[in-house]
């Protein structure tokens, strides 16, 4: 700021002709020094900074920790000593077995306790006679020793010719005893001084090994649980604090022997596995429903603990991952790394990924319908495509594929598949439906051929529909008034899939489907239960998990709804007899190999080299359109009337592709009604009259109209 300069000191008298002038300058504000802080305040602040500093706190924790190691070690050694001299250990084991309801084991521990007490009683009775026996033994031993020494001296005297040598061995023995006494006198004083320190060091070592200190005083890596090994005591404490009163009370009755519930803790891949036999009155469901709390008690995240039910009754199997291990990626697929790999549909197994134990997860695809489901963008197409890529390396396998997403995920199968439909529109759904219906016709042709030759072997046909929920939800209704979508008996896609599920396996016509966000509408019950291999990525609810895998798998511990969306991409929960599942479990969790588009194209190129030239069609060729009414007249021939069932049979023989399973009595009736005629009953059965069909043809020709199949 600017202003007038005001002199603050007295100046000499100015000359008479001097005039006062002003100029603009910058004025600085003078800030007074703050009031001095009292010494006691500064001292208090310094003390607080020192006492709250992390180094001070760590030093305090260290002092408490090492002191408590000695206290805890003393307690542990005292407990061990007490257990060794009394029957308390047997009593604890006895109570633990009774609490667990295992009365055979309880009886065995009771017998051991009785034997221990009898042996202890004998030892105590022996103590009544031991002083006299010890005195007798000492006297006899001393006499025998002196006699032996004198006898040795006599031998020496005879040998040396000196009588004095008779007492030489005895004198040497006395001098040796005197030397030992002098050594003890020298060592005794320092030993009394050092002994307590050595005892404290031993107690400290025991306490440190058992982490016998308060949790807040333990090192940071132990407090956070990072790298903490899973021990029996940790598992028992986690179960005790699970919030199940019956379980908590049973463990309290067991005392420190709560670990009797546990089987051996086994290394299993990137974690450990342990079987827990629950006490009587505790249901396995109560433990399964508290998975998150159990994981937190074990210092793990929820997704790092899996609970399954083995064969043994009242037993849960816990698989506990190492901290952060499941967030590490698995290696590439053997399909990518091994360029010499081939496939065998009949005897081989496809490499799909790794199970939680780190073992390779391979699955047999022989005569098994497949269903893969999950939420959107979680790896469904990649998981389904990985199996198809492996199977493409078997040149005998045929593929019909409908990709209803239509963004090129299956484009590498152009030149491998006989049929490849790509696109999300209703027209593409219609083509996919016709493809599945044609697969039904192929299945029927194979079944008919198998009747004539039971030894006939067919090339496997894999009918794959990705994003199948679009087919089930398609609103289009065909010319025959039958909807393409839906789950009714008139729904074309639904009925075609059901027919393949029912009979396709016997002649190696298999249905593979990938669908997302399953509901009863976009994945009907009969379709999902028709798949032999059911696999699920992450889902939103338990009800969806039951749709995807079935009640048995979910009740047995399968929990795709507990996977993490976005973080557990490609992780499948699988229920199938084609993959090795641990005994007693109904499902297995597999982290699948992800094969990106570029390596997938390279694998497909190897498959094309094995197969040679394959022409891929963009849909099913239905042949030329036929005149259905004229065909009915032709199959009736000269007969005055013919049963409707016989008419349909002859139509099918005339052209099985056109007059397939979709042609029924109702379809034939609608055809005649469109031309003013209809089947009539004769002797209780529906028949078609030749005269009526010819009249309909004449009327139609006169109107210039034609009815096409």
Image: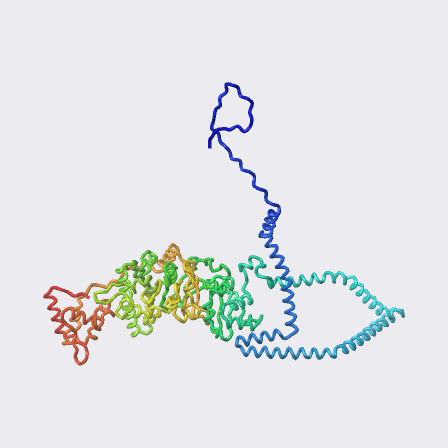
Q: How far from the left and from the top, in percent, is residue 351?
A: 42, 63
Report whether 701 appears left or right of 227. Answer: left
Between 624 and 401, the one nearer to me in the picture: 401
Q: How far from the left and from the top, in percent, is residue 8?
A: 54, 29
Q: How far from the left and from the top, in percent, is residue 228?
A: 54, 61
Depicted 124 relative to depicted 59: above or below? below
Residue 393: quadrant of the picture: bottom left
Q: Which colour scheme is used?
A: rainbow
Report whether 352 appears left or right of 49. Answer: left
Residue 683: quadrant of the picture: bottom left
Q: In percent of the image, x 10 and y 65: which residue is there?
A: 703
Say if residue 489 shows up in the picture: yes
Between 567 and 218, the one nearer to me in the picture: 218
Looking at this rendering, what residue extends furthest in the top direction?
Answer: 17
Depicted 39 relative to depicted 401: above or below? above
Residue 589: quadrant of the picture: bottom left
Between 471 and 559, the one nearer to me in the picture: 559
Q: How far from the left and from the top, in percent, is residue 338?
A: 43, 58
Looking at this rendering, what residue extends furthest in the bottom direction?
Answer: 683
Between 230 and 3, the one nearer to me in the picture: 3
Say if residue 458 shows up in the picture: no
Report whether 260 appears left or right of 700. Answer: right
Q: In percent of the image, x 47 and y 26: which residue is there?
A: 22
Q: Quadrant of the C terminus?
A: bottom left
Q: In percent of the image, x 21 and y 75: which residue is there?
A: 645
Number of marks in the image? 0
């Amino acid at each position: 700021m600017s202003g007038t300069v005001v002199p603050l000191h007295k100046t000499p008298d100015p000359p008479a002709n001097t005039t006062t002038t002003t100029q603009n300058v910058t004025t600085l504000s003078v800030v007074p020094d703050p009031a001095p802080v009292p010494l006691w305040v500064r001292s208090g602040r310094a003390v607080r900074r020192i006492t709250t500093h992390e180094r001070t706190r760590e030093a305090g924790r260290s002092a408490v920790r090492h002191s408590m190691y000695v206290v805890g070690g003393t307690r542990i050694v005292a407990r061990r000593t007490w257990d060794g001299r009394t029957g308390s250990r047997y009593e604890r084991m006895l109570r633990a077995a009774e609490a667990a309801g295992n009365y055979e084991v309880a009886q065995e521990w009771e017998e051991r306790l009785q034997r221990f007490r009898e042996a202890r009683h004998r030892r105590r009775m022996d103590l009544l006679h031991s002083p006299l026996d010890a005195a007798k033994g000492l006297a006899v031993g001393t006499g025998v020793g002196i006699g032996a020494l004198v006898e040795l001296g006599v031998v020496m005297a005879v040998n040396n010719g000196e009588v004095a040598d008779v007492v030489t061995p005895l004198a040497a023995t006395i001098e040796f005893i005197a030397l030992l006494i002098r050594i003890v006198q020298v060592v005794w004083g320092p030993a009394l001084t050092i002994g307590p320190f050595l005892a404290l060091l031993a107690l400290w070592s025991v306490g440190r090994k058992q982490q016998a200190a308060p949790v807040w005083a333990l090192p940071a890596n132990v407090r956070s649980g990072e790298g903490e090994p899973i021990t029996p005591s940790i598992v028992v404490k986690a179960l005790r604090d699970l919030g199940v009163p019956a379980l908590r009370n049973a463990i309290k009755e067991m005392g420190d022997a709560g670990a009797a519930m546990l089987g051996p803790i086994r290394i299993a891949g990137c974690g450990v596995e342990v079987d827990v036999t629950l006490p009587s009155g505790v249901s396995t469901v109560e433990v399964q429903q508290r998975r998150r709390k159990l994981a937190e008690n074990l210092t793990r995240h929820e997704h790092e603990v899996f609970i399954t039910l083995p064969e043994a009754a009242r037993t849960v199997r816990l698989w506990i991952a190492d901290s952060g291990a499941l967030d590490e990626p698995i290696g590439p697929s053997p399909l990518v790394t091994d360029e010499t790999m081939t496939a065998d549909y009949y005897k081989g197994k496809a490499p799909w990924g790794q199970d939680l134990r780190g073992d390779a997860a391979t699955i047999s695809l022989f005569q098994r319908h497949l269903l893969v489901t999950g939420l959107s963008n979680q790896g469904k197409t990649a998981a389904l495509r990985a199996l198809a890529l492996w199977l493409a390396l078997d040149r005998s396998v045929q593929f019909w594929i409908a990709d209803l997403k239509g963004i090129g995920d299956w484009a590498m199968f152009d030149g491998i598949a006989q049929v490849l439909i790509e696109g999300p529109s209703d027209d593409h759904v219609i083509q996919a439906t016709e493809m599945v219906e044609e697969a039904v016709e192929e299945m029927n042709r194979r079944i008919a051929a198998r009747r004539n030759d039971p030894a006939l072997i067919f090339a496997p046909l894999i009918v794959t529909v990705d994003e199948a929920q679009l087919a089930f939800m398609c609103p289009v209704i065909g010319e025959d008034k039958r909807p393409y979508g839906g789950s009714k008996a008139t729904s074309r896609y639904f009925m075609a899939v059901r027919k393949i599920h029912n009979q396709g396996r016997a002649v190696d016509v298999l249905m593979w489907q990938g669908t997302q966000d399953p509901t009863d509408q976009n994945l009907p019950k009969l379709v999902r239960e028709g798949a032999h291999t059911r696999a699920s990525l992450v889902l939103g609810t338990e009800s969806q998990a039951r749709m995807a895998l079935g009640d048995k798998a979910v009740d047995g511990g399968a929990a795709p709804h507990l996977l993490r969306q976005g973080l557990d991409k490609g992780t499948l929960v699988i229920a199938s007899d084609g993959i090795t599942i641990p005994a007693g479990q109904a499902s297995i969790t597999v982290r699948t190999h992800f094969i990106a588009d570029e390596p997938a194209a390279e694998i497909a190129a190897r498959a094309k080299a094995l197969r040679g030239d394959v022409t891929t069609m963009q849909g099913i060729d239905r042949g030329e359109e036929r005149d259905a009414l004229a065909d009915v007249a032709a199959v009736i021939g000269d007969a005055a009337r013919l049963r409707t069932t016989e008419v349909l049979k002859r139509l099918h023989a005339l052209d099985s592709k056109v007059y397939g399973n979709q042609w029924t009595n109702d379809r034939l009736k609608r055809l005649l009604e469109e031309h003013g005629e209809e089947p009539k009953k004769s002797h209780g059965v529906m028949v078609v009259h030749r005269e009526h069909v010819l009249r309909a043809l004449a009327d139609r020709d006169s109107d210039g109209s034609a009815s096409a199949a």
